[in-house]
Image (tube, coloured by chain):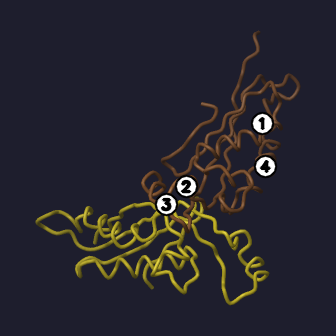
Chain colours: A yellow, B brown
Amino acid sequence: MVYLTRLEHFNAAHKLYNPNWSAEQNELVFGKCANENWHGHNYELFVTIKGEVNRDTGFLFDVKKLSELMKIHILEKLDHKNLNIDVDFMQGQMCSTENLAKAIWEQLSAHLPAEVNLHCIKLYETPRIYVEYFGD
Amino acid sequence: MAPKKVSVFRHEHFNAAHRLYNPAWSFEKNDAVFGKCNNPSFHGHNYELIVKVTGVPDASTGYVIDLKELSDLIKREVHERFDHKNLNLDTAEFKELNPTAEHIAIVIHDLLRPHIDADKELQIRLYETPRNFVEYPA
């Protein structure tokens, strides 16, 4: 079993705001992140796949193809966007890093060939904060 | 011994939403010039700020500037204005000024400058992304 990781980056605006709560409760729970006019981050996205190495190519998966899948299904939807407003697959969800990592997993796993398994989505919201999602 | 100048640095960070947009231009022209940065619903960055102060260390303290005082100054003048804010909507400084990294660096310099001794030099380095950064004064 080999693990292969591709790193991409995007930046976006968001806010943490639960529409079912009052402004006061949002402020209490989310603090500055609840700013109604948004704030933003440079996100760093690590996608790790796992599987066996193909005897003919020596590849687990063509990393250029992985990069293209990430660009088409993730970066084009998220980069320079407002996560709360502009992103179809985040509609109706809180735009936390946790939920975003899970959503990226869902978007990407649908487009990977059967012999390639997604292992981990690691998503940095800031250089000091990141989440990992392993699909379970 | 001739006085020897030393540069000291404080590294801070903040994050914010912004949009690059010139209201004097059409949407199409803004789109042509600023591309994805012109998204009307904004995007955002983690900004990394490096403040450089240069001067001769004080004979009594050995300090160019007390870095705790510099840190407190940056928190008061920069973080409270810009951290977790929308630069276009929430700040007085960018009501009329396009919030490019260049302009943000100049604004931060001008906010800090009055609070730092006149015999010290001040330079701002601002990272908009890990790969894009600016310095002012040049």
Residues at discs 1 and 4 in contact (Cβ within 8 Å): no
Q: Which amino acid does label 1 sit on?
A: Arg
The numbered mark at residue B20 is: 2
Disc 2 vs disc 3: Cβ atoms closer than 8 Å? no
At label 2, the amino acid type is Leu
Picture coordinates of residue B90, whole percent (x, y)? 71, 62
Q: Are marks 4 and 2 on the same chain?
A: yes
Image height of A1 relative to A92, above or below? above
Q: In this view, does A65 lie above or below B20?
A: below
Q: Give the SS element for disc 1.
A: helix
**Residue receiving disc 3:** B27
The residue to which callout 4 is attached is B77
Q: The disc labelled 3 sits on which kind of residue?
A: Phe
For the residue labelled by badge 2, is the local secondary structure a helix, a strand or a loop? loop
Q: Name the residue under label 1.
A: B113
- Image mark 1: chain: B
Residue A17, compared with residue A76, is above or below; it is below
Query: Which quadrant holds the N terminus of chain A?
Result: bottom left
Category of crowding for the residue at label 2, using alpha-carbon neighbours closer than 10 angstroms: few (below 14), some (14–19), many (at least 20): many
Q: Distance between the residues labelled 1 and 4?
A: 11 Å
- Say which residue appears at 66% left-offset and 56% top-offset: B14
Rounded to the nearest angstrom, the CA distance separating label 2 from label 3 is: 11 Å
CA–CA distance in space, label 1 to label 3: 36 Å
